[in-house]
């Protein structure tokens, strides 16, 4: 492949553009020169692209959730001897100004959510981490031993021995 194949087509010079514009105006037609990845497109095309990206991401997220749900449903339910190794929380927060005022002059609104996780070690040394609800999290203590019930990546329960 020669170097000629890698060259970009040259845009007309400003003088050429002016000459072409005059010729087109005389013929009653209009032409504009634009550059960029969306040359010749307006804000409508940009919105269409953004909406398309949003739709693709939403479909992917829903598809991924359905895939995990279906995989868990088709996994066998297991009950194994296990020990609680560790627990952790993940706190996510959101803070935004009220009344659309970015300075915060009208105050801020904040919200937070917490997700709880527990890691179990099975008799064979394998470690599994599950998302658990807040009451289960509170009842679990590191070092507890008992029967762990799960299905795929879905936590079903833990009975202390």
Image (cartoon, rainbow, N blue to C red):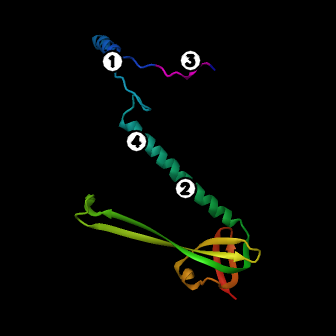
Q: CA distance from mark 1 to mark 4?
A: 30 Å
Q: Which residues are magenta?
A: 2-9
State the residue at coordinates (67%, 66%): 72
Q: CA distance from mark 2 to mark 1?
A: 47 Å
**Tag of residue 58:** none
Distance of label 4 from label 2 (alpha carbons): 21 Å
Label 2 to label 3: alpha-carbon separation:
43 Å
* Residue that label 1 marks: 14
Left or right of residue 12, residue 53 in this image: right
Q: Residue 126 placed where, x, y %?
A: 72, 71
Residue occupying the point 36% across, 37% down = 43
Q: CA distance from mark 3 to mark 4?
A: 36 Å
Question: Marks 2 and 3: which is nearer the front?
Answer: 3
Kind of element beneath mark 1 = helix
Give the residue number, with chain letter if any, for mark 4.
47
Residue under the image location 34 percent in, 16 percent down: 17
Name the side, left or right, on which 69 lies relative to 46: right
Residue 33 image position (x, y, % from top left): 36, 23
Residue farthest along the front direction in this orientation: 3
| Residue found at the far bottom of this picture | 161
Marks 1 and 2: in contact by CB < 8 Å? no
* Residue labelled with disc 2: 61
Q: Is residue 61 left or right of residue 93?
A: right
Residue 36 vertical placement versus 90 (above, below) = above
Give the image location of residue 93, x and y in percent: 42, 67
Number of residues whose C-alpha sits closer than 10 Å to that of mark 4, classed few (under 14), some (14–19) or many (20 or more): few
**Disc nearer the start of the sequence (2/1):** 1
Q: Secondary structure at mark 3?
A: helix
First in sequence, mark 2 or 3: give its number: 3
Q: Counting other residues with Cα less than 10 Å from the Cα at mark 3, is it few (<14), some (14-19), or many (20 or more)?
A: few
Choose the circle earlier in sequence order: 1 or 4: 1
Q: Which residue is mark 3?
A: 4
């Amino acid at each position: 492949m020669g170097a000629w194949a890698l060259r970009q087509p040259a845009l007309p010079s400003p003088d050429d553009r002016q000459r072409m514009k005059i010729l087109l105006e005389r013929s009653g037609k209009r032409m504009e020169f634009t550059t960029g990845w969306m040359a010749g497109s307006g804000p409508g095309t940009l919105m269409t692209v953004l909406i398309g990206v949003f739709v693709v991401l939403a479909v992917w997220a829903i598809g991924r959730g359905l895939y995990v749900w279906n995989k868990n449903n088709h996994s066998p339910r297991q009950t194994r001897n296990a020990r609680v190794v560790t627990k952790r929380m993940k706190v996510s927060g959101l803070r935004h100004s009220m009344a659309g005022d970015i300075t915060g002059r009208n105050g801020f609104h904040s919200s937070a959510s917490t997700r709880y996780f527990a890691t179990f070690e099975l008799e064979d040394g394998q470690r599994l981490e599950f998302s658990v609800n807040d009451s289960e999290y509170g009842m679990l203590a590191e070092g507890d031993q008992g029967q762990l019930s799960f299905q795929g990546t879905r936590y079903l329960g833990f009975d202390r021995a």
